[in-house]
Image (spheres, rainbow, N blue to C red):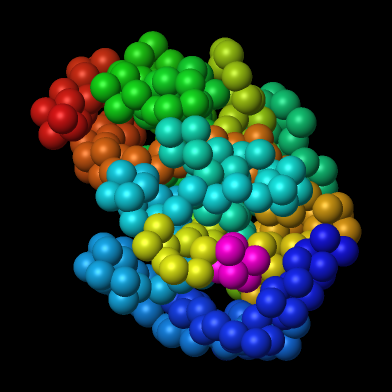
Amino acid sequence: MKRRLTLLALALAGSANAATLTVWTHFNDAAEVAWLKSQVNIYSRLSGNTVNLVTVPMDKIVDQLLKTAKQGKGPDVIVTLPQDRIGQLAQAHVIEPITSSRRIEFDPTTLRALTVGGQLYGLPMFAESVALVYNKKLVPTAPATYADFLRAAKKNTDASAGRYGFLTDLSNAYMNYGFFSAYGAYVFGGTGTLDVHDIGLNNAGARKALAFMNDLRFKDKLVPAGTTGDKVKAAFLKGQAAMIVTGPWDMGDIKKAGINYGITAFPTPPGATGKWSPFVGVQGVVLNAYGKQKPLATAFAEGLVTSVAQLSFNQAGGRIPVNLSVRTRLASNPVVAGFGRVISGGTPMPNVPEMGQVWGPWSSAVDASVQKPAQNYAALLDTAVKAMQKTIK
């Protein structure tokens, strides 16, 4: 109701002097583009204002915004930006902090992902994370403990027959961050504001995470060498893998394969001090700091994240909604419910530019750690962190 009154007020105010908003979007899925156009039509009808919708490729949005914002030639609103670019743009002062009463409606994890220096720089639209996806024909119920998981994984493993109880890409740092977090490792420390000089990827917890991943391959003999993300997915689609770690991006193919699946968090690994908490990626609606119509831009942005809009957005493209009331309404949707729970317990991927200096060395250490049994994990991680520290100023 409050949203509708706001738009009606804008319509009355704008009837004598209608405005035009420029909105950039990278959406290219036909259903999501149609959804956005419908939201534009609703806004225009209620406000009396015009929206100029411009398609800009995802990999060009940031550079174009940096070039045009201060010249007054950029967009009023961007739909959407991923959190890993938010820090860079906030530091460049080209995106606007947002004050919105709607923030109480969102999953707190997604708000943290779009917060820099204590200020919110976007209204979250959708989120994603990895989770444990299991074939109910092979694993009838979600493993509640690691003992349950290991029992089910070993029961369904017969490498000679091409059957695997559990598969994941052990060489992928992003996919395996949940193990690091469970054992008390972290990328950057700090509370509220990230401290990029406090890197927690070579502490005792990080060493335990690598040892655990190594055990999955060499001690427990669950994940064979050469297992890539593509091979993990292919095995699951063929019914040859009972449990895998993947994200919402694979669920369409899993549904098409007719697999009766479940989605849950990976159980707490043995000896871990915390729960498995994978990286969470969030995309949000962002405002240009140099936009000349910020009240109208804010009203348009808020209209895209109402519960009604979020529900129809999910129905259009299947994205995991961040509005908690919408997740409740979609509780019978196993993808939304499963990934929604994991996202709420996940860790926002750092949104500062310095994350770019982390991926290479960290990924190399993770990959090397699972190439042979019982390695010097401390040496691998110390080398990686030293490489990060040399490039982070």
* Front residue (pair 239, 208): 208
Residues 245 and 184: in front is 184
Determine whether, in the image, residue 73 is placed left or right of residue 102. Answer: left
Rendered location of residue 128, percent (x, y): 58, 54
x, y percentage for residue 305?
69, 63
Q: For residue 207, what is the image quadrant? A: top left
Q: Is residue 324 visible?
A: yes
Residue 300 is inside the magenta segment: yes
141 in magenta: no
Residue in the picture at 49% in, 60% down: 286
Q: Is residue 272 left or right of residue 231?
A: right
Q: On screen, 393 above or below 191?
A: below
Tell me the quarter of the picture where residue 239 sits: bottom right
* Magenta-drawn stretch, dominant element (helix, strand or loop): helix
Residue 129 in sight in this render: no
The quadrant of the picture occupied by the N terminus is bottom right
Image coordinates for residue 228, horizontal then vertical, percent: 39, 55
Residue 124 lies, with reference to residue 8, above or below; the image says: above
Quadrant containing the C terminus in the rendered view? top left
Residue at the far left in the pictured view: 390
Q: Residue at x 57, y 33 (%)?
A: 277
Residue 15 spot, x, y in % from top left: 68, 86
Magenta highlight range: 295-301
Q: Nearer the viewer, residue 175 or 126?
A: 126
User: Quarter-wise, where is residue 382 in the image?
Assistant: top left
**Quick one: 291 or 311, which is closer to the camera?**
291
The residue lying at 60 percent from left, 55 percent from top is 124
Q: Residue at x 62, y 25 (%)?
A: 275
Q: Is residue 211 left or right of residue 249?
A: left
- Total marks drawn? 0
